[in-house]
Image (cartoon, rainbow, N blue to C red):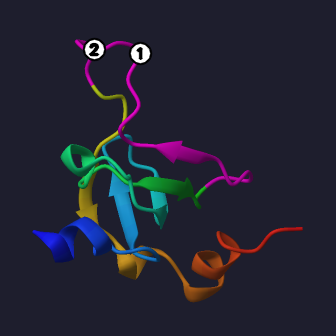
Amino acid sequence: KAFIGVMGVYPVGSGVELNTGDVAVVVRQNRELHHVHRPWVTLVNGASRESLNLAARESDDAPYRFSIVRAADDLVPPSQRASCFLTE
């Protein structure tokens, strides 16, 4: 439990596919333990690098807009993965 709390279910740098079909890279763990399976990700299949908090909802009873459907390391080339962590 402690290990998952630190590393998360999807470690930073992991490629994931979202329920929307978008491909993203995990860039930060969610600090709330009950959202350990909903990290922050950056989309990599579009022109912009949009960051998303997968734990975000419009209200407490609203459904989550984004969910991870599978780990997708094979869909994210190393150069795209690295670009998620570079700042200008």
Q: Which residue is mark 1?
A: 58
Q: Is residue 83 above or below residue 22?
A: below
Q: Is residue 8 visible?
A: no
Rendered image quadrant of residue 59: top left
Tag 1 near tag 2, CB within 8 Å: yes
| Residue placed furthest toward the left | 1
**Which span of residues is magenta-colored?**
46-63
Position of residue 77 measured from the top left corner of the image (x, y, whole percent): 54, 83
Q: Check residue 67 for magenta coloring.
A: no
For the residue marked with disc 1, what is the amino acid?
Glu
In the image, 23 versus 36, the foreground residue is: 36
Please indicate whether residue 10 sits to the left or right of residue 22 in the image. Answer: left
Position of residue 55 measured from the top left corner of the image (x, y, whole percent): 35, 38
Q: Residue at x 57, y 87 (%)?
A: 78
Q: Residue at x 41, y 31 (%)?
A: 56
| Residue placed furthest toward the bottom | 78
In the image, 75 versus 59, the foreground residue is: 59
In the image, 62 versus 76, the foreground residue is: 62
Circle 1 packing at 10 Å, graded few (<14), some (14-19), many (20+), is: few
Quadrant containing the N terminus is bottom left
Q: Is residue 14 visible?
A: yes
Q: Is residue 70 above or below residue 69?
A: below
Please indicate whether residue 77 sits to the left or right of residue 29 in the image. Answer: right
Marks 1 and 2, how far apart at CA: 6 Å
For the residue marked with disc 2, what is the amino acid?
Ala
Q: Residue at x 31, y 46 (%)?
A: 32
Position of residue 26 measured from the top left corner of the image (x, y, whole percent): 45, 65
Please indicate whether residue 88 sits to the left or right of residue 33 in the image. Answer: right
Rendered image quadrant of residue 2: bottom left
Circle 2 packing at 10 Å, graded few (<14), some (14-19), many (20+), is: few
Q: Which mark, by number, is residue 39? A: none
Q: Which mark, by number, is residue 62? A: 2
